[in-house]
Each structure stands twice: as C-alpha cells, then as structure tokens.
Image (spheres, rainbow, N blue to C red):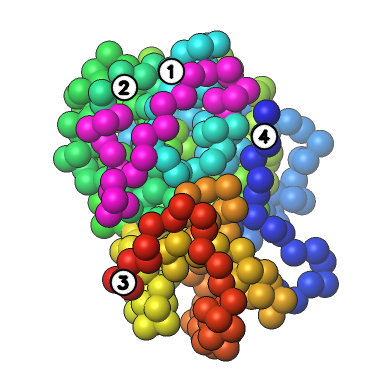
C-alpha cells in the first residue's frame, strides 16, 4: 500500500515561509499556554483521564452538544482511524469524492475496503447525489473539501443523510470555522451522521493533536470500544479545554485569515491562475493543463513552501495555505518573478484539456 504523504516540515534552523500544510499563522489563545504550563508542573507521572473529560466538557459547553455525543481523538486523523476500525470490514464499500483528503485512501487500504471515488463536479462542487447512489457502508464528505475549498450546504448534507438513512455519513469539518455554514446540528436529528472537528486549524493547535467527533450516543459508545486507552495526553487535554473556553480569540484569528484569503484569491487571479472560491484556510491555484511541480520547486528554492500533488488530477495546481499578510506578499512577489520563465518553458500534461481562463 502507499502511505499517506504529509507536507514537508522544515528542519530546525531552516528559514522557510510555510504555506503547505494549512496551519494557522496566528498563535493560540494565551489561556492555552497558561493551562499547559500549569499542567506541566502537576502530576505528569500519572496517566491522563481516559476519556479526556475536561476537553469533552469544554466541547459540550462550546458546541451545546451533550457530552455523551462526543468523543475526543489525537487529531481528527485518529478519529477517522477509529471510524474505519469500528465500521469497515474487508470488502466493505467506502465512498468519498475525488480528489479529497488523501488519508481516506490510506485508511481504506489498511481496512482492505472497496472504494468508490466519485469525481468532483466540473465547478469543484462536491458530488453528493452520486455519493448517495453508491449506498456505501461508510460515506465521507470533507466540507470544506481539500484541496479546493468547496463546501457542501447544510441542506444538501441533510438530504444526503436522509438518502443514506440506513448507512453512516461522516462529515469531516476540519476547516469549517473558515466557512459560512456547518452541519453540526445534523447529529441531533440524524442518527446516521458523524461530524468531525479539529483544533489544528482555526484554534492554532496543530502541534497538540486534538480532534472531536460528534454523533448519536450509540455510535460514540461503539467508537469507545476501539479507542486507544489513553489517546490524549494531559497537556493536550488542558490545552483543548482552554482553547474551547476562549472562542472569541479563535474567531478573531479566523476573521484575519478570511480577509487575507479574499486578497489572496484576487492577487492569484491577477497573476493568471484559476482560483475557485474557497471557504477554507487555503486556496487552490491552477494553470490548467500544466504540471506545476517545477513552479513549486522554484518557490521552494526561494524559501516558500506550497503543496503540489504530483499524482493527483490537480498536478496543474498548487494548494496555498493562508499565512500572514507579509508571507503572502512574499509569495506574490516570488510568483511574479517566476511565472514569465515558467510560461516560456512549461510543458503541457499529456492528454490534458485546453487551459481555461482565469476565474
């Protein structure tokens, strides 16, 4: 099987502008640091609470969901692993859009599942009707979707949940705080819906590995059977609880990212890229029909990391995380300098359609 390939992480001492792994450019709430320092001087010799009670309690208050409808994970990645472990057997069908978060492929391979990969609509919309037709044991919708940032509307997800009434629907909302709508309330009305959240993006806690799953209590009870005994450490538990207790801090940072995202879309389009509207903390920049690996490598030599997907249908695109305004200016300046040479030397991808106009 092919392993999941994460984005490049700079080594200590490397001075790089990191726009490749969708981290938040702003720090977490000061309450998080205080909570970690206090816990670090306490009893680290003792095991943490097996069910991360303080974190779960804070999530129940922040999202107004009963605590028996919540389970915590070591990032939403672990929660996805738990879902596959609990639900998917050898040969069971799993369905999700393509392209999307590539970890789904890895987990499906581990489970030896049968996978229905449903192509995105030509305008990057998520193919919910086609997903419903698959009647898979487990259907996953990443909304907003990576790498293009498209979001499925609440009503469309509700309709999909009804169409899959005797099957499970996972809505992976890793980036949803940057979007205009979410599906969290579906867990109260649809027994077959599981909503995933992470504190890596909007809460600026990628380094703490904190995720949450919301679902009917019967589903949460089954997931606890396959959870590692102490899957969150003591520092992560108090960090998550402190972050959820300071929602205004998170929302201020989210608004800053949104403003920079809007500017980034405009600047990239002015440079000739096709940029679909994004509701995440990243954008997709395409030069349709041209492999952008050389452009990503040229940016890397200038100290700027962006994400290129060499084996994806988006070989002709770069996914660009939203950084601070100064970091984005450095990106725009580098692209303006590099693009003339790239266009002179670029070769079209074999069999690729004709380039579309920037939009």
Give the CA separation, mark 4 to mark 3.
35 Å
Give the residue at mark 2.
Answer: 134
The residue that label 4 is drawn on is 2
Measured Cα–Cα span from mark 4 to mark 2: 25 Å
Span highlighted in magenta in the image: 107-131
| Residue at the (40%, 78%) spot, across then down | 272
Q: Nearer the viewer, residue 356 or 109?
A: 356
Badge 4 or badge 2: first in the primary sequence: 4
Residue 55 x, y percent position in the rendering:
52, 40
- Dot 3 falls on a residue whose secondary structure is loop
Query: Can residue 306 be seen here?
Result: no
The residues bearing labels 1 and 4 have C-alpha atoms spaced at a distance of 19 Å
For the residue pair 251 and 170, the one nearer the viewer reads as 170
Q: Label 3 belongs to which residue?
A: 357
Marks 3 and 2, Cα distance to the nearest angstrom? 34 Å
- The residue carrying pointer 3 sits among few (fewer than 14), some (14 to 19) or many (20 or more) residues within 10 Å by Cα, namely few
Q: Nearer the viewer, residue 8 or 71?
A: 8
Looking at this rendering, what residue extends furthest in the top direction? 90
Q: Position of residue 34 (x, y in %)?
A: 63, 60
Residue mark closest to the camera, 4 vs 3: 3
* Residue where numbered disc 1 is placed: 93
The answer to whether 10 is drawn above or below residue 239 in the figure is below
Residue at the front extreme, as displayed: 351
- From what the image shows, is residue 145 above or below residue 29? above
Q: Nearer the viewer, residue 40 or 287?
A: 287
Q: Earlier in the sequence, mark 3 or mark 2?
A: 2
Image spot of residue 97 (x, y percent): 38, 38
Q: Residue at x 68, y 28 (%)?
A: 1
Label 4 environment density (alpha carbons within 10 Å; few <14, some 14–19, many ≥20):
few
First in sequence: mark 1 vs mark 4: 4
């Amino acid at each position: 099987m092919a392993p999941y390939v994460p984005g490049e992480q700079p080594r200590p001492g490397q001075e790089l502008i990191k726009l490749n792994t969708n981290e938040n450019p702003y720090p977490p709430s000061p309450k998080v640091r205080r909570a970690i320092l206090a816990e670090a001087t306490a009893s680290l010799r003792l095991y943490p609470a097996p069910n991360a009670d303080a974190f779960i309690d804070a999530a129940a208050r922040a999202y107004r969901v009963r605590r028996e409808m919540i389970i915590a994970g070591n990032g939403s990645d672990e929660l996805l692993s738990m879902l596959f472990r609990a639900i998917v057997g050898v040969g069971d069908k799993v369905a999700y859009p393509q392209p999307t978060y590539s970890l789904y492929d890895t987990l499906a391979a581990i489970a030896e599942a049968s996978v229905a990969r449903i192509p995105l609509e030509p305008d990057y919309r998520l193919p919910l009707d086609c997903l419903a037709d698959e009647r898979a044991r487990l259907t996953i919708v990443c909304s907003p979707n990576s790498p293009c940032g498209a979001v499925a509307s609440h009503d469309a997800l509700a309709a999909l949940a009804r169409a899959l009434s005797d099957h499970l629907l996972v809505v992976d909302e890793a980036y949803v705080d940057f979007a205009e709508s979410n599906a969290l309330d579906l867990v109260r009305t649809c027994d077959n819906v599981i909503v995933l959240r992470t504190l890596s993006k909007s809460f600026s806690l990628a380094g703490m590995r904190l995720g949450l799953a919301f679902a009917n209590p019967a589903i949460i009870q089954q997931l606890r059977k396959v959870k590692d005994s102490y899957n969150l450490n003591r520092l992560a538990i108090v960090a998550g609880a402190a972050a959820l207790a300071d929602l205004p801090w998170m929302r201020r940072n989210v608004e800053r990212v949104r403003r920079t995202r809007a500017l980034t879309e405009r600047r990239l389009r002015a440079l000739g890229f096709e940029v679909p509207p994004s509701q995440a903390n990243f954008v997709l920049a395409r030069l349709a029909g041209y492999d952008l690996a050389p452009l990503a490598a040229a940016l890397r030599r200038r100290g700027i990391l962006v994400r290129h997907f060499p084996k994806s249908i988006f070989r002709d695109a770069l996914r660009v995380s939203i950084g601070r305004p100064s970091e984005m200016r450095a990106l725009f300046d580098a692209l303006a300098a590099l693009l003339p040479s790239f266009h002179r030397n670029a070769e079209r991808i074999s069999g690729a359609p004709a380039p579309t106009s920037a939009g």
